[in-house]
Image: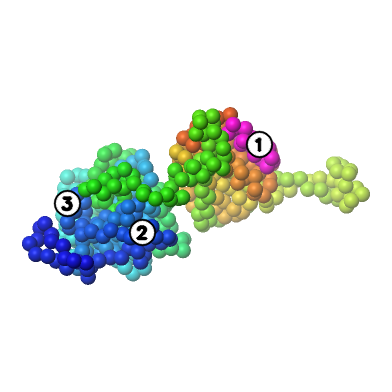
Amino acid sequence: MSPVRSPRAGAPRPLAPHHPFPELVEPGPHHGPWTIADSRDQPWLPTNGAANLVTRHLFVPLERGGLGVSRHELAHVRWSPRRFPRVRHPLIVLQAVEDARINLGLERIGLVVTLDREQLAHVAHLAARDAKAGDVAATVIRAVASLGTEGEAALREEIAALPGFQADLARRLVEDVEARLLSAAGRSDRPVAPFRVAREAARDLARRLEQYDLLRPDHEVEGLGCCHVLLDGEARDGIGFELPWPDPREPEARRRAYAHRYPDGSASGEGVAPGAMSIATPPLVERQPRRLHAGVRRRVATTEGTFVRRPDRFAIDRAIFVRRVRGEGGTILVDVSGSMSFGAKGLEALVRAAGGAAVVAIYSGSGDVGELRIVARGDRRVASDQLEPVGRGNIVDLPALEWLARQPEPRLWVSDGCVTGVGDSGCDRLRARCEAVAQRGRIRRVDTPDAAVRVLEGG
């Protein structure tokens, strides 16, 4: 690479010795070369590093002191999703938690994000200014983003300097995010926690800050928020962020695939296509007791009993009596969309009551995609934070029911019966399809968690 003249320095500087190679760490198939630019020559960047995984642009300081930044951005290339989801809280919170997820992953493999003296002094200066201005949210967010880096100690000092209960609150919020990310990474076979855990931790952090009236909808934190998270349609200095080639993992491509699979006339307005469904299988980390009232009951024929129920079996095996047993089989599918109004306690009670059932899964979605998540199997279940829905809509009722129809019997569907597809819209044709799948698959529907618990207890 030829030397590039900096607008701030008067002499050319060699860049090649500090040039990163994202192609070496990028997972999966490659979609072309990366464009590497010196972040010191990009005045529009809020910080000294950024990576856009959609357009394959990487901005890092091409100097000896930029090693830590380059390491961090390459970790985004390796472990971060190509695009960030839209969230209802300030995006800066999710950006900070994602930075922490990446930094802690690097720390686990022995590649701590290092900062030179100038960078450390700059981080400490910004944190001190936040604390002096009474911006507790900015102090917390900045401290979260520093987890796993050499700047973590300086940020913890600024948190300790906050007045009164704010210091204790900020410390607990940061430690909670760190504990969740480290715990999830420990359960995973990868150095980093799943991105889903970061998204949930960011949501809960934003809720806690909003609870104390510390976080505004437009909250900004200077010097944070540029790491690969520029959203679709944004542009800087003529660099567009539209995906130039088709990607089957993108929601629009998945929606077209489902529209082709289910020809409901969506294009002509005659019907609604179901959303694209993914199946998640988080670790079943908690053990739950096989409660006496748990498991779906079933009838079995036996040779002993009081009342003859199966005289037709006398010539076969003399099992003319019937008794009810609590089977180990069964599958329970739970609609956790907003219309169900489950709440954490209701869903916890249902999962506990299902102790001993073969499989319990929940599903929900938003827009044109949804997720079915297996949350219990036998006497094992997921952690409580995995019971949170991924969206407020149904979206994927039809593919979820098709999944249920292939699972072990008996099959129980906890839903209000309102089915929707893309855009959380419903239609008669989609409802008829769901009813046909339920009838063909011998799926029993109940309306409420209480009714589901009664069925599980044999009522």
Q: Residue furthest left?
A: 10
**Image quarter (top left, top right, bottom left or bottom right) of the C terminus:** top right
Residue drawn at x 36%, y 59% is: 32
> Along the polypeptide, which appears first: circle 2 or circle 1?
2
Name the secondary structure under disc 3.
loop
Q: Which residues are magenta?
A: 429-453
Name the secondary structure under disc 2.
loop
- Residue nearest the viewer, comparing 45 with 270: 270
Image coordinates of residue 392 in percent, x first then y, are: 46, 37
Three-letter amino acid code of the residue under disc 1: Ala
Image coordinates of residue 410 in percent, x first then y, are: 68, 45
Q: Is residue 21 above or below residue 427?
A: below
Three-letter amino acid code of the residue under disc 2: Gly
- Residue nearest the viewer, comparing 406 with 416: 406
Q: Which residue is mark 1?
A: 436
Instruction: Considering the whole magenta stretch, tell me its main secondary structure.
Output: helix
Residue 144 makes an appearance in the image: no
Separation of residues labelled 3 and 1 (CA atoms): 59 Å
Name the secondary structure under disc 1.
helix
Mark nearer the viewer, 2 or 3: 2
Q: Is residue 327 above or below residue 396?
A: below
Mark nearer the viewer, 2 or 1: 2
Q: Which residue is mark 2?
A: 32
Image coordinates of residue 202 in percent, x first then y, are: 36, 48
Question: Mark 2: few, some, or many residues within 10 Å (few <14, many ≥20)?
Answer: few
Q: Which residue is mark 3?
A: 43
> Along the polypeptide, which appears first: circle 2 or circle 3?
2
